[in-house]
Structure formats: structure tokens, C-alpha cells
Image (spheres, rainbow, N blue to C red):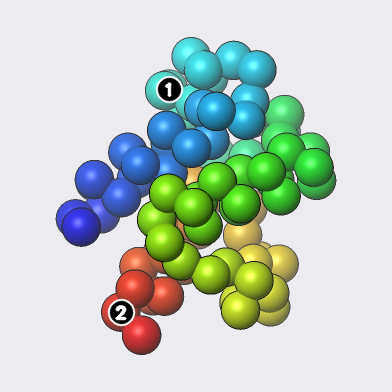
């Protein structure tokens, strides 16, 4: 899956857990998720769970790397690394 397609899939999952879909559609890849889309810790867990289901990956195996995730670009990069491994 190309990065742009992957980013689109990730945005779709994110839109399912945040109250304002428009914010997700216009979200810059380097914007902080917690402050930009009001993604709290529970929302972040729901987002990650949705990614695991949608993309068929196990993010829980990468807890240390997840701690550094703050942006959409971070999620895309982590997912690409996981798929390449």
C-alpha cells in the first residue's frame, strides 16, 4: 500500500473516533493529534484498536515506539516500518 493510500486509511479510522470529521480531513500530517483533534488517551486507544483491525497489524508489539507517536505522519511511518519488518 502506498503512503498516500495508507494515510487515507489511517485518516478514515481516526475520523471514526473524533467528533469532528472535517478536522481530520484537513489535518496536517505534522499536526499534534492530542491538541488538533482533541484525541485524549481513551480516544487514542480506540484509534489504535481501529488501526489494528483495519490494517491487520499488532501495534501492541511496539509499545516503546507508540510512546513517541504524536502526529499522523508518526503513525504512517510506524505502520510502514511494521509492514516492512
The answer to whether 32 is drawn above or below residue 51 in the figure is above
Is residue 71 shown above or below 27?
below
Q: Quadrant of the C terminus?
A: bottom left
Q: Residue at x 42, y 33 (%)?
A: 12
Q: Residues within 10 Å of mark 1 (few under 14, many from 20)?
A: few
Q: Residue at x 73, y 38 (%)?
A: 43
Q: Residue 22, percent across and down?
A: 48, 14
Which residue corresponds to mark 1? 26
- Residue extending farthest bottom: 85
Few, some or many C-alpha atoms within 10 Å of disc 2 (few <14, some 14-19, many ≥20)? few
**Disc number at residue 59?**
none
Element carrying mark 2? helix
The spot of residue 26 in percent (x, y) is 43, 22
**Residue 4 at x, y = what percent?**
24, 46
Please give the residue where the numbered disc 2 appears in the rendered image: 84
Is residue 75 rendered to the left or right of residue 6?
A: right
Inspect this view and state whether residue 73 appears: no
Position of residue 33 measured from the top left corner of the image (x, y, whole percent): 63, 40
Amino acid at each position: 500500500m502506498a503512503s498516500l493510500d495508507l494515510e487515507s486509511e489511517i485518516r478514515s479510522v481516526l475520523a471514526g473516533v473524533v467528533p469532528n470529521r472535517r478536522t481530520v480531513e484537513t489535518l496536517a500530517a505534522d499536526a499534534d493529534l492530542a491538541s488538533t483533534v482533541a484525541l485524549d488517551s481513551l480516544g487514542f486507544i480506540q484509534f489504535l484498536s481501529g488501526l489494528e483491525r483495519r490494517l491487520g497489524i499488532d501495534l501492541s508489539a511496539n509499545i516503546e515506539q507508540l510512546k513517541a507517536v504524536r502526529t499522523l505522519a508518526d503513525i504512517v511511518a510506524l505502520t510502514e516500518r511494521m509492514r516492512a519488518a
